[in-house]
Amino acid sequence: HNTLIMNTMKKINNTWPTNTKEQPLIIAGPCSAETEEQVMEIAHQLKTTGTSIYRAGIWKPRTRPGMFEGVGAEGLKWLQRVKEETGLRVATEVANKDHVNECLKHGIDVLWIGARTTANPFAVQEIADALQGVDVPVLVKNPVNPDVNLWLGAIERLEKAGISNPGAIHRGISPLGKSIYRNNPEWQMPLALKEQRPDILLINDPSHIAGNRQLLAGIAETAIGLEMEGLMIETHHNPDAAWSDAAQQITPQALTVLLAKMKLTTGTA
Ligand code: PEP
Ligand code: MN
């Protein structure tokens, strides 16, 4: 993985923290923060997996109504506790200016823009405006439709607002007919982004592409083979009981095994 390591190093610039200098960026944690106990349990179990950023959704953009929509701002206090007790950095999804302001108030280290939000330039601009003058790391998921320009455009809106080192997350595209994937990878999409913006950190989210645990490892391997510089993997201490995205989440122990098999952890686990 020599090229990968070199590229990751170039882009880290203290913005994207990895546990060791020889490891791609690993972001892990539950799809949704559910309870304070759940958030803390998973965070403590992740301490020895090679994860450097803890993810948990607080405001959940559900495609259809009537499902768990997140615990809201209350969960930000739990993420603060994760930071204090584990030393992991913490990340959550923002979709509007109120989310951004709440996150900044609570010291959230990394923000990400979800796939449904990236598809909406008005929402992205609102987020960018709320971040004016605050250079916090922001990761941008590819939009739900296969439009590389929308993805690039969201990144550019953040850059124009003064975000100096935005990153990108490849999470695939919702398929119209049957597919083995929850979201088709459409690998040409991240490759096109990489070609136009080789300077931007690009990581892969195999969890939302797979939609199930079985396909996860193969997608992660392909992504790293294509020289993506990290992985965001949904992780839960009791995946089957998760309040959202249960079928695709893996335990912290399974994450350790996955990363070791891919030789992505170098001695921190
Ligand atoms: C998530 O990361 O839990 C999420 C909702 O992802 P996406 O925006 O990629 O659907
Ligand atoms: Mn999810």
Image (spheres, rainbow, N blue to C red):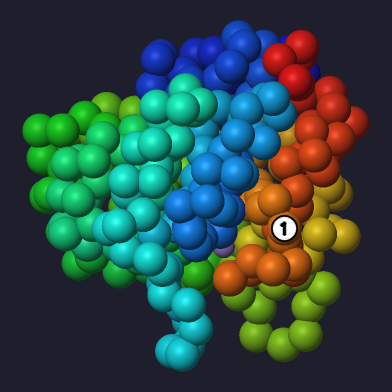
Which picture quadrant has residue 123?
Answer: bottom left
Answer above or below: position of 93 versus 180.
above
Task: Give the camera-side residue of 240 and 211.
Answer: 240
Question: Picture coordinates of residue 207 (x, y %)?
Answer: 68, 56
Q: Residues within 10 Å of mark 1 (few under 14, many from 20)?
A: some
Residue 196 in sight in this render: no
Q: Quadrant of the N terminus?
A: top right
What residue sits 50% from the left and 71% below the top? 145
- The answer to whether residue 3 is left or right of residue 60 is right
Residue corresponding to mark 1? 238
- Which residue is depicted at the point 69% across and 68% down? 241
Measured from the top left, where is residue 34 in percent x and y? 50, 62
Amino acid type of the residue that numbered disc 1 sits on in the rendered structure = Asn
Where does residue 141 sit, x and y in percent of width and height?
47, 53
Q: Percent x, y for residue 122?
A: 20, 67
Q: Which of the 4 image quadrants contains residue 26?
A: top right
* Residue at 27%, 58% in the rendered image: 73
Determine which quarter of the picture holds residue 203.
top right
Give the side of residue 30 with respect to residue 220, left or right.
left
User: Which element is circle 1 on?
Assistant: loop
| Residue closer to the observer: 48 or 231 | 48
